[in-house]
Structure formats: structure tokens, C-alpha cells
Amino acid sequence: MPKVSFVNEKQDIEVEVGANLRAEARKAGIAIHGTVMSFLNPVTNVLNCRGNGLCGTCRVLVKKGMENLSPKTTIEKIHLAAHPETRLVSIGQEEEIRLACQVKVQGDCTIETHPQLNWHGENFWQKPYPNK
């Protein structure tokens, strides 16, 4: 069974192959939902889209094991590109940000919940769409 390691919570859980990351985290008591405005985090644990990929509050940063997760869904790609808060969080780490409700776990991975804005780092000030 795949092992999912949650960095912030210092907790590892074992899940079935193909299990939904959001559902398994919630079963383990891990508060997966959050916003940039941390005072809203308790609210988002109750008021969210229930795993439909619409609210973006279950976004996570994949530290290791991206190859062991399902590919990004169409809803996930649209949301990550269009939602203002999620877009700001993902600057500089676009490939590593995922919506937990859309992720199916296929193997071991390491996850950081509640990724924060990088206000002072170089990633925040870089161009979001570099010239090709």
C-alpha cells in the first residue's frame, strides 16, 4: 500500500492504490482545506466544494512522488490557471501544486498542506508566463 507523508502534520498514512488524497487525509484527521488568509481556515474545513475541484481550498504542494499521482484533471488545470488565490500560491511551483480532491494516489508521495504565498522570494516576482 502506498504511503503518503504529510510534512506539516508530521504524519504518514497508508492508503489503497487509487485512493483520493483529500478523502484519505480527512479520514486520518488531517485538515486539508485552507486559504492564504489563515483566519478563514476553520471556515473552509466546513464550507468547501466537497471535492468537486471548484473552491481550491484543498490545494497541496507535492514535495516528492509526483510521478506516483494521477495526472492533472481538466477541472484541476482550469482551476489552477484561473483562480486568483490558487494562481498566486502556485507562482514558481506550478507543476508541484495540486488539488487534493482531484488526486488519486498510485504510490508513495510527500505532501505539504496549506502552501503559502512566496511574498518575499524570487518566485513571486518572476513572470508567470516566461517568453518562449
Image (cartoon, rainbow, N blue to C red):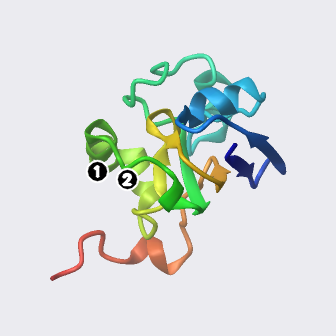
- The residue depicted at 37 percent of the width and 77 percent of the height is 126
Residue 111 at what x, y percent from top left?
A: 64, 53
Task: Give the answer, above or below, for where 73 lies relative to 63.
Answer: above
- The residue depicted at 44 percent of the width and 36 percent of the height is 102
Residue 88 at what x, y percent from top left?
A: 42, 56
| Measured Cα–Cα span from mark 1 to mark 2 | 6 Å
**Dot 1: element:** helix
Residue 75 at what x, y percent from top left?
A: 29, 36
The reply to whether the C-beta atoms of the residues labelled 1 and 2 are less than 8 Å apart is yes
Give the residue type at disc 1: Ala
- Give the residue number, with chain letter if any, for mark 2: 87
Residue 109: name its quadrant: bottom right
Residue 45: name its quadrant: top right
Assess disc 2: are there few (<14), some (14-19) or many (≥20) residues with their C-alpha within 10 Å of its C-alpha.
some
The foreground one among 74 and 81 is 74
- Give the residue number, with chain letter if any, for mark 1: 81
Locate the N terminus by quadrant: top right
Give the residue type at disc 2: Arg
